[in-house]
Image (cartoon, grey):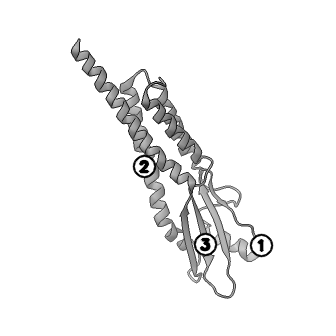
Amino acid sequence: MIQRVQSIYFLLALVCVSLVLIFPLFSVNVVSGGTDDTVSANAEFGAYGLIFTSDIQSLQDATFRYQAFENLSDDPDSGKYPVYLIFIGLSLLTAVCILFYKNRKRQLAVARLNLVLHFLVILTLVVFYYFGTDAVKNTVPVNANLIVSFSLETGFYFLVASLPFLILANRGIKNDEKLVKSLDRIR
């Protein structure tokens, strides 16, 4: 099992996806554009939803925070959307790929499904990253002048880093299958 190179690639992909549970995917910074009284709210979006990182210093900060992130989070301590279930599912699917080492056809089918699901999750996060600014601006009152900035964090890069490992693992399974078929032809 471990002597096959695709097992190493699956293990590296499993580590990358597991680290997404620890690190945030991206952070959001919302600042009011008013020149007289500037108010800001900072939050990180990770596997456990949207979590605020800035402290509340006044009632104005608290109302601004809840207006800016009203649709994205109900509670300032924990996020509204439990995204961790997706990443736990991806981790389990990658672990299943490692355990199917005896049946290459089944391993290849599960590995391809795993690759497609990883790609869809990354694509969804990229779309949310680029269109999230408009979503945050649409949740606040029209008269608020906001500057919304998103920045990618470490968790997103770990998730993207798992893709090449999954592609290399799929290639290794296909090469093993070709080798076994060529040996069967020789007999």
Label 1 and label 3: CA atoms lie apart by 16 Å
| Residue 24 lies in quadrant | bottom right
Give residue 120's mark: 2
Measured as percent of width and height from the top left, residue 99 is found at: 49, 26
Residue 78, above or below 185: below
Label 1 and label 2: CA atoms lie apart by 39 Å
Q: Is residue 41 left or right of residue 147?
A: right
How packed mark 1 is, by other alpha carbons closer than 10 Å (few <14, some 14-19, many 20 or more), is few
* Along the viewing direction, whichever of 185 and 99 lies nearer the viewer: 185
For the point 47% across and 23% down, the residue is 1
Label 3 and label 2: CA atoms lie apart by 28 Å
For the point 43% across and 54% down, the residue is 123
> Of the residues under marks 3 and 2, which one precedes in the sequence?
3
Location of the C terminus by quadrant is top left
Amino acid type, label 2 = Leu
Element on which disc 3 rests: strand
Residue, disc 3: 30
Residue 177, above or below 161: above
Amino acid type, label 3 = Val
| Residue 185 lies in quadrant | top left
Element on which disc 2 rests: helix
Residue, disc 1: 57
> Of the residues under marks 1 and 3, which one precedes in the sequence?
3
Amino acid type, label 1 = Gln
Residue 104, above or below 122: above
Query: Do tag 1 and tag 3 residues touch (Cβ < 8 Å)?
Result: no
For the point 30% across and 20% down, the residue is 180
